[in-house]
Image (spheres, grey):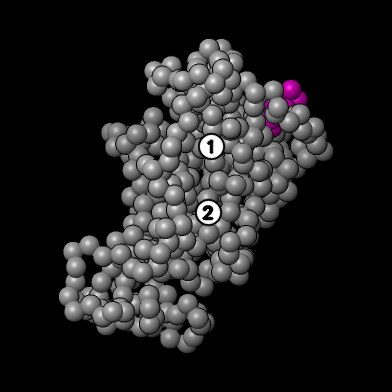
Amino acid sequence: MSTQSIKEQSNTQPISIFNPQEDKKLELQKFKKNKVCAECKSWIIRQKSIRCGICEDVYHLFCMRPKLTRKPKKWTCTRCLELKNTFPDTNDLEIDTLCGRCQKHVQSDDEEFCSKCSKVFHSKCYGLKKVSPICIFCEQSKPPKIKQNKNLVQFLPLKISLKKQKSFILPCCIYDDSLREKCFNSIQYALYCQNICFNDDLVYESVQKIENNVCYEKLEPLIGKDLETFKKYKQVTKHGYYAPVIVEYNIDQGFYVKAVQPIANNTLICEYAGEVFRFADQVYSTSDSMMSLLETNFAATSLVIIPQKYGNLAKYLSGINNTKKNSKKQQQNVKSQRFNVEGESRVILYACREIRTGEVLYYDYNEGGFNYNTRFFV
């Protein structure tokens, strides 16, 4: 996700990161966004301000130290300059070209890369003949399959709703016990291959939960039957059970999610889970799964989700290629939307049309006015 995306999704303007409840909130929301100095938190005139090319925060020229008398064509704020030193430059990293099995040099046209141990192998040394994301050593040391709790099935309906629903509905239970177990373990296996701990909730280690406060941004509230359905579904998903889908792998697309039973329109798929960070601390992140959580128009208070250490099914849903003609109309069957869930921003993914058995689940990364580059997507 580009830095521009963090700035464009909100339609409201914050007043102060120190006192969001002050009386002038409604009056100040009339102003255009990106008009508040990130240093002194007061309103600015565009001709006397400058925008950081990395985090896109805006500053008064006279708030700079040393002061700027004119605008440079390209400018980076002090915070981003200091932060850059904490992120490794991947171009400078030495890549080990010795095979992890035979310890001989590996040519680029005969290499296989293990996504778990990050070692390179000769094709014949990699192990399994079938397409696999991990090497034979990691495959042998994978943990035993988790025994599923069949009592959780009672929370899900046994039949697909044929009525057109405007509100969220629970996914239908997977009919076959062995297929249900296979789908459950496919998610756990994908997470294992990428060294991700399963967690179906937002994880607050780098920031405090109180920072995820929707008073900074106007979001559609999740209320009534929708909220009730969401809470009921979370009782199931927190144990690793989701809609009737399975996670599979191929060499071109990597991991992807496919429906094993029909899924009705407006069916809940999952919540986007992972660790929560301030956007200002992740402007140099190379993560390919950064999701916007809270938009405040300040990089220091905007929040993003990165499922790099913790994650769930949402990590493996595919994004559509926006550069292909009619790709949104033909491919997209899942919608991602941020909701106000009891005062907290949450990202929910749900079916935006009926999904047939065997369909791969796709959603639009640029749903909220993002500018994420999708031209390399399958």
Quadrant in which residue 59 is drawn: bottom left
| Callout 1 amino acid | Tyr
Q: Name the side, left or right, on which 189 lies relative to 332.
A: right
Q: Dot 2: within a 10 Å radius of its alpha carbon, few (fewer than 14), some, or many (20 or more) residues?
A: many
Q: Which residues are magenta?
A: 176-185
Q: Tell me, yes or no, if residue 44 can be seen here.
A: no
Which numbered disc flags the more N-terminal residue, 1 or 2? 2
- Prevalent SS, magenta region: helix
- C-beta proximity under 8 Å, tags 1 and 2: no
State whether residue 90 is above or below residue 303: above
Q: Dot 1: within a 10 Å radius of its alpha carbon, few (fewer than 14), some, or many (20 or more) residues?
A: many
Q: Name the side, left or right, on which 101 lies relative to 55.
A: right
What residue do we see at 58% from left, 64% from top?
207
Q: Tell me, yes or no, if residue 80 can be seen here.
A: yes
Task: Single out the residue that lies furthest toward the bottom.
Answer: 23
Q: Which mark is residue 316?
A: 1
Q: Name the side, left or right, on which 187 lies relative to 46.
A: right
Q: Which residue is mark 2?
A: 305
Q: Position of residue 76 (x, y in %)?
A: 30, 64
